[in-house]
Structure formats: structure tokens, C-alpha cells
């Protein structure tokens, strides 16, 4: 498919997937990068690789009934979209959040295919979740929901078939309840069926930290490409969940000062640098809102409904959710001297925001490259489960570091090869599509 065919192709994706705005956005961003690659490999067009990649292999939607603490019946909707298995079993997280719908799951699964390809590990791509909101629910309610969710999902997953993990609203607690129910129904201790497990029952060291650490390492590599490092730089990280907490920790280990983070209620500004131990206590142990952090720390203030991207910084890591950083926010960051942006979240920057960064010469690392450390370490967890082995923190972190360095190099060099030096969006999309495309051609029309 050449450039002039991309517009009608995209129109057809919109027609076939009505109302799925995030999915359209994710497809658009990829296809816009692919003209020169498709010209280089005519076989991809002949075998309709792009058309097939944009049609998930399987889309599963199911009812999840459960009983709340008051004895009332609740009904949620569950999803698993298995997008592409050319490189390995479907792999990708589960998201529990009221905003979850088919379009969101498809966009996340689509991105996941390319992200997983960039890691170089043998994993395909998929994603799932539910519109269930764990916020404000008791542990018992979360357990009953997870058990009902898995009572349907178990028939679609497996170590060699589809391997879910966590995402927004799904952490070690939820993975525990999901794994327990899978084990009970199947009567198999199949550790490799889920990743993000607890350390006592098949989990891997560094998995909790991996996405955030990996994003910070990617930012380190982006700076290193220009002979710079993080030491002494000021950074801002949105969100205060799993990805954000460990991105902050690693940025500060590498010498930066992170002066702000956020949740969906507001922004904490802490010019002295975020106290990661306190942040973990508030968010991971107490499961409280972020204002509690500011209550306990003299140097910090909390502002409701504030815009984190107006806080001056040199490095920005969006680590909360999709489309949280728009064109206006990008301009604020650029005007305030930001030169490096690495996405810890999936598609947090709108197309206008991405364009603004690229036009201004900001080094911009898209999520499918910058946050791939999480899924890469999930693949390392699967590797340890398969060999009944357990690696040390240091060994696993060194593997993560190598993987992130390799992903950065691959994206950087591919962008240069395709005439777009410094453009990590093109580098990531082209390098990933090439890997998946070659495998799909080799496997025949499946
Ligand atoms: P968590 O649930 O642990 O944390 C999410 C954070 O983002 C919370 O601070 C939450 O605040 C905030 N947030 C969520 N929705 C919104 C919203 N609509 N507006 C503002 N803030 C919001 O999720 P993760 O940290 O795991 O995931 C964050 C992002 O990283 C997601 O895009 C996810 O897909 C991506 N990702 C995660 C990976 C992982 O390994 N966990 C791997 C790769 C990507 P609040 O509590 O107020 O909702």
C-alpha cells in the first residue's frame, strides 16, 4: 500500500469500527508512519498485512455478575481482545476502570502488538478489562468481582494462548484473586498464565518497578543520544499509580529531581523533590488520595484540578492515562524549557501534542517504546515460570536495562534509516511493524 492508499484505508477502519475514537487515533498514528516501509516491502501490501493487523484475531465480550457487600447484584462487562499472535501468545494487561469500553481495549491491544514486537521477546499482543471501578470497593467485593470475571475468562487464556497482566486498577491484589480462581477452575498451577503475580507465588522481582523504571531508562537513553544525562535536571511525572511511582524513583536514582505528580483530583507540587517512600505509603499501603501526601510533607502543596504540565521542567513523563497531554499542554512544556518527553502511559499525548513536540525538536518517546519495560519484564517472569527458576533483583534489572537500551537503539537507528532522524514515533512504528509483518508473511494467510 502506498501513501495515496492510506487515506481510504483509514476511512475503512473508521467505518468498520464505529464510535471507537481511541482505536481510530492509535491506527492513524501507526499508518501515518508506514508509507516508506510499505514501499520497501511490496509483499506486505500483497498479503494485506496492514488490513489484517487492524482486524483483531478475536474479540470477546462477556457479562460479569457479582454480589456487593449489601447483597445486591451488580453487573459489569468484561472484555478480552486478542489482536495478533504472529510473534507469540497474546500478551497484555487487564484494565478495571469505569471508562473501559471496546474501543479503549482495542486501542490498547493494537498498541500492545507493536510494543511487544519492539521488546524482541516472543509475545503477541492483546488487552482486556472491565468497566468495573475498584475505587471505594472492599477487598471482598474486589475478590468476588475478580472470581466472576475469571469464571468466564479462564476458557480463553493459557500459558501458550493468552497471558494477561495488570494495568490501571489491576495490581497484585487483583492478579492474586484472578490467579486463585483460574487455579481452582482448571486444577492446574499454571504460573505462566498471568504475570504481575506476588513474589511468594510465581511473581518476578522487578516486575512491579519495570514499567516506570523502563520509562526513566528510555529517557536516560534519549538524553545520552545527545551526550547528556539526567543528573541535575528537573522532571515532572503525571499520575501516582504503579508506573508513576517507579518512574519517579528511577529518575531520582539517576540524579533528576521530580517536582510534581498527580491523580485525577489534582496535582502535588514538591520543589524539594518527591519523597518516594511517603508516596508509596500513601498510595500503595493506605490506598489514599494524593492530598494526604501534601498534608504530611512541609515542602509540598496540593492543588485540586490543577494542570501538571504548567509546572516548569526539563523532562516530562506522562504516566496516568490516554490523552492526558494535549496541544496546549505541550506548548506550556515547550515554553517552560522541556526538551525530553517519554510516555509511561499508553497514548497519553494527543496527536496535536505529539505534533507540537516534534515541530519544536523536543525528543519525544512514544509509549509503545518508552513503556515497553513492563511487558518485557512480564516475559522474563514467564521465562522464570517456565524454567521453575527465580532470578535476583540485580540480574533482572540488568536485563531490563539492556532491553530498554536495545529498544531505544532500534527506534533511533530505524528513524535515521527511514529519513526521519530523531523521530522516535516513526522509528518505533516502522521497526515494530516490520517485525510483525515479516512473521505474518512467513506464517501464511492466517
Ligand atoms: P494505576 O491504576 O496504578 O495508576 C493510574 C494513575 O493514573 C493513578 O494515579 C490515577 O489517578 C491516574 N489516572 C487514571 N485515570 C485518570 C484520568 N482519567 N485522569 C487523570 N488521572 C488518571 O495504573 P498504572 O500506573 O498501571 O497505569 C498507568 C498508565 O500506564 C496507563 O496508561 C497504562 O495503560 C500504562 N501502562 C501500564 C503498565 C503497567 O505495567 N502497569 C505497562 C505499560 C503501560 P486516580 O487514582 O485518581 O484514578
Image (spheres, rainbow, N blue to C red):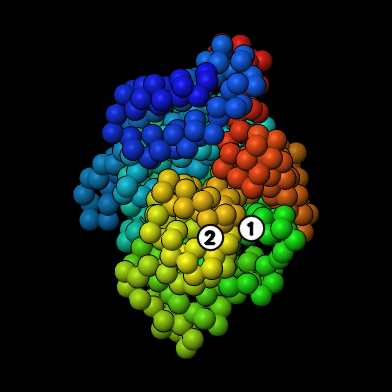
Query: Is 358 located above or below residue 125 in the figure?
Result: below
Q: Where's residue 233, x and y in %?
A: 63, 72
- Determine if the C-beta at disc 2 is less than 8 A from ligand 1: no
Q: Where's residue 110, x and y in %?
A: 48, 34
Q: Where's residue 397, x and y in %?
A: 73, 56
| Quarter of image, res 421 | top right
Residue receiving disc 2: 317
For residue 63, the mark is none
Q: Secondary structure at mark 1?
A: helix
Q: Quadrant of the C terminus?
A: top right
Residue receiving disc 1: 219
* Label 2 vs 1, first from the N-terminus: 1
Disc 2 crowd rating (10 Å Cα; few below 14, some 14-19, many 20+) is many
Q: CA distance from mark 2 to mark 1?
A: 9 Å
Q: Is residue 232 rendered to the left or right of residue 145?
A: right
Residue plotted at (58% across, 50% down): 365
Residue plotted at (25% across, 45% down): 74
Amino acid at each position: 500500500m502506498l501513501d495515496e492508499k492510506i487515506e481510504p484505508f483509514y476511512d475503512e477502519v473508521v467505518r468498520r469500527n464505529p464510535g471507537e475514537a481511541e482505536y481510530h487515533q492509535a491506527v492513524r498514528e501507526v499508518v501515518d508512519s508506514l508509507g516508506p516501509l510499505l514501499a520497501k516491502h511490496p509483499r506486505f501490501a500483497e498479503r494485506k498485512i496492514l488490513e489484517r493487523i487492524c482486524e483483531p484475531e478475536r474479540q470477546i465480550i462477556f457479562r460479569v455478575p457479582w454480589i456487593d457487600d449489601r447483597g445486591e447484584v451488580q453487573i459489569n462487562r468484561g472484555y478480552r481482545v486478542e489482536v495478533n499472535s504472529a510473534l507469540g501468545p497474546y500478551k497484555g494487561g487487564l484494565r478495571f476502570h469505569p471508562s473501559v469500553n471496546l474501543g479503549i481495549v482495542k486501542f490498547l491491544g493494537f498498541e500492545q502488538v507493536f510494543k511487544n514486537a519492539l521488546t524482541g521477546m516472543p509475545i503477541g499482543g492483546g488487552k482486556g478489562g472491565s468497566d468495573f471501578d475498584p475505587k471505594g470497593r472492599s477487598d471482598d467485593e474486589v475478590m468476588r468481582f475478580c472470581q466472576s470475571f475469571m469464571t468466564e475468562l479462564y476458557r480463553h487464556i493459557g500459558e501458550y494462548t493468552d497471558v494477561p497482566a495488570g494495568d490501571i486498577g489491576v495490581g497484585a491484589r487483583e492478579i492474586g484473586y484472578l490467579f486463585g480462581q483460574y487455579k481452582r477452575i482448571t486444577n492446574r498451577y499454571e504460573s505462566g498464565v498471568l504475570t504481575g503475580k506476588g513474589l511468594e507465588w510465581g511473581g518476578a522481582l522487578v516486575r512491579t518497578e519495570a514499567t516506570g523504571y523502563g520509562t526513566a531508562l528510555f529517557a536516560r537513553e534519549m538524553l545520552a543520544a545527545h551526550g547528556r544525562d539526567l543528573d541535575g535536571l528537573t522532571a515532572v511525572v503525571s499520575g501516582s499509580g504503579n508506573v508513576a511511582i517507579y518512574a519517579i524513583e528511577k529518575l531520582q536514582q539517576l540524579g533528576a529531581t521530580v517536582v510534581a505528580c498527580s491523580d485525577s483530583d489534582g496535582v502535588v507540587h514538591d520543589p524539594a523533590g518527591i519523597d518516594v517512600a511517603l508516596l508509596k505509603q500513601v498510595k500503595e499501603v493506605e490506598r489514599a488520595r494524593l492530598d494526604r501526601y501534601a498534608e504530611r510533607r512541609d515542602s509540598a502543596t496540593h492543588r485540586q484540578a490543577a494542570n501538571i504540565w504548567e509546572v516548569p521542567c526539563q523532562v516530562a513523563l506522562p504516566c496516568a492515562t490516554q490523552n492526558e497531554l494535549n496541544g496546549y499542554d505541550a506548548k506550556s512544556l515547550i515554553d517552560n524549557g522541556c526538551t525530553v518527553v517519554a510516555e509511561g502511559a499508553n497514548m497519553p499525548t494527543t496527536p496535536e501534542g505529539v505534533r507540537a513536540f516534534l515541530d519544536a525538536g523536543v525528543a519525544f518517546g512514544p509509549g509503545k517504546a518508552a513503556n515497553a519495560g513492563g511487558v518485557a519484564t512480564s516475559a522474563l517472569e514467564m521465562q522464570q515460570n517456565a524454567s521453575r527458576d527465580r532470578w535476583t533483583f540485580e540480574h533482572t534489572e540488568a536485563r531490563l536495562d539492556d532491553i530498554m537500551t536495545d529498544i531505544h537503539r532500534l527506534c533511533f537507528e530505524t528513524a535515521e534509516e527511514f529519513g526521519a532522524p530523531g523521530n522516535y514515533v516513526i522509528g518505533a512504528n516502522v521497526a515494530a511493524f516490520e517485525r510483525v509483518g515479516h512473521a505474518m508473511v512467513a506464517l501464511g494467510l492466517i
